[in-house]
Image: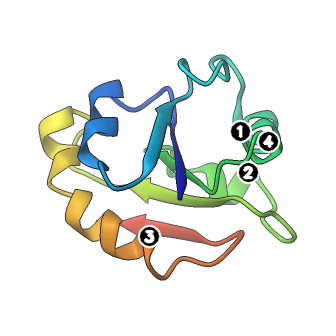
């Protein structure tokens, strides 16, 4: 499964998903793209999941017909130590998430 870490997430979080191909938006040359354009570009290059902390993305985008899914990490802060606590639940969600689905991890 190909995972894309949004640029609003600490890049070191990619190391928490060793069983998946995980890249940051910067490394994948997708930095600077926002919401819809980021989703389209990520789909075009074959990413399956976008991992973000942007809790507004489901309200701003239509996911009907999308092949990319979104995991929203909802920690108390966006600091790496807080997001790492959500990784076990995020990994579990990767096994059941459907195409175009948005899942919030708390």
Q: How far is the residue under mark 2 from the one under mark 3?
A: 23 Å
Q: Is residue 56 positioned above or below 31 on the image?
A: below
The residue pinned by badge 1 equals 35
Q: Dot 2, crowdedness within 10 Å: few (<14), some or many (≥20)?
A: few
Q: Toward the viewer: 26 or 18?
A: 18
Which label belongs to residue 36? 4
The residue pinned by badge 3 equals 94
Give whichever of discs 1 and 3 has the lower sequence position.
1
Q: Are marks 1 and 2 in contact (CB under 8 Å)?
A: yes
Which label belongs to residue 60? 2
Q: How far is the residue under mark 4 from the one under mark 2?
A: 8 Å
* Place of residue 105 in the rendered image (x, y in percent of width and height, measured from the top left): 35, 65
Q: Is residue 63 positioned above or below 13 on the image?
A: below
Which label belongs to residue 45? none
Give whichever of discs 3 and 4 has the lower sequence position.
4
In the figure, is residue 65 to the left or right of 5? Answer: right
Q: Dot 4, crowdedness within 10 Å: few (<14), some or many (≥20)?
A: some
Q: How far is the residue under mark 4 from the one under mark 1?
A: 4 Å
């Amino acid at each position: 499964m190909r995972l894309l870490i949004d640029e609003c997430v600490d890049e070191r979080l990619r190391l928490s998903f060793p069983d998946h191909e995980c890249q940051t938006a910067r490394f994948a040359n997708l930095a600077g793209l926002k919401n819809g354009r980021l989703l389209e570009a990520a789909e075009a290059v074959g990413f399956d999941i976008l991992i973000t902390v942007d809790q507004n993305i489901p309200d701003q985008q239509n996911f009907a017909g999308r092949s990319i899914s979104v995991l929203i990490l909802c920690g108390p802060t966006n600091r790496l130590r807080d997001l790492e606590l959500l990784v076990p639940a995020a990994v579990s969600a990767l096994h059941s998430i459907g195409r175009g689905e948005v899942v919030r991890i708390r």
